[in-house]
Amino acid sequence: MRSDVAPSPPTARSPRLDGLRIVVLGLGRSGLAAVRLAASKGARVLAADIRSEDELGTALDEARSVGA
């Protein structure tokens, strides 16, 4: 990369999350979507929800399956 050319800023469609730590609060539909997106972009994801593991059911399994 040339040093005299500024890198392109990240866009909403291509956020640079590789290596970042992301916290997602709530594992409802949008929380799970945020977990999936952040994990797919290389972030280390921590997910939290006020509900118990039993109450979360498959949402917890899905979050864990992508690395949260």
Image (cartoon, rainbow, N blue to C red):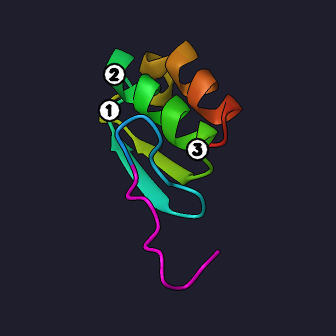
Q: Residue at x 45, y 20 (%)?
A: 56
Where is the C terminus found, in terms of image quarters? top right
Query: Is 42 within the magenta?
Result: no
Is residue 32 positioned above or below 22 on the image?
above
Measured as percent of width and height from the top left, residue 49 is found at 35, 36
Is residue 68 positioned above or below 34 on the image?
below
**Magenta span of residues:** 1-10
Could you say which is closer to the camera, residue 29 or residue 7? 7
Measured as percent of width and height from the top left, residue 67 is found at 66, 42
In the picture as drawn, the residue positioned furthest to the bottom comes out as: 3
Which residue is the site of mark 2?
30
Label 1 neighbour load within 10 Å: few <14, some 14-19, many 20+:
some
- First in residue order: circle 2 vs circle 3: 2
Which residue is the site of mark 1?
26
Could you say which is closer to the camera, residue 54 or residue 61? 61
Q: Helix, strand or loop at disc 2?
A: helix
Label 3 neighbour load within 10 Å: few <14, some 14-19, many 20+:
some
Is residue 24 positioned above or below 26 on the image?
below
- Nearer to us: label 2 or label 3: 3
Label 2 neighbour load within 10 Å: few <14, some 14-19, many 20+:
few
Measured as percent of width and height from the top left, residue 12 is found at 34, 39
Is residue 58 positioned above or below 1 on the image?
above
Could you say which is closer to the camera, residue 7 or residue 59? 7
Measured as percent of width and height from the top left, residue 63 is found at 57, 30
Q: Quadrant of residue 36?
A: top right
Q: Do the residues labelled 1 and 2 touch (CB within 8 Å)?
A: yes
What is the CA distance from the residue labelled 1 to the residue labelled 3?
19 Å
Which residue is the site of mark 3?
41
Q: In which quarter of the image is residue 34?
A: top left
In the rendered structure, which amino acid carries the disc numbered 3?
Answer: Lys
In the rendered structure, which amino acid carries the disc numbered 2?
Answer: Ser
- Nearer to us: label 1 or label 2: 2
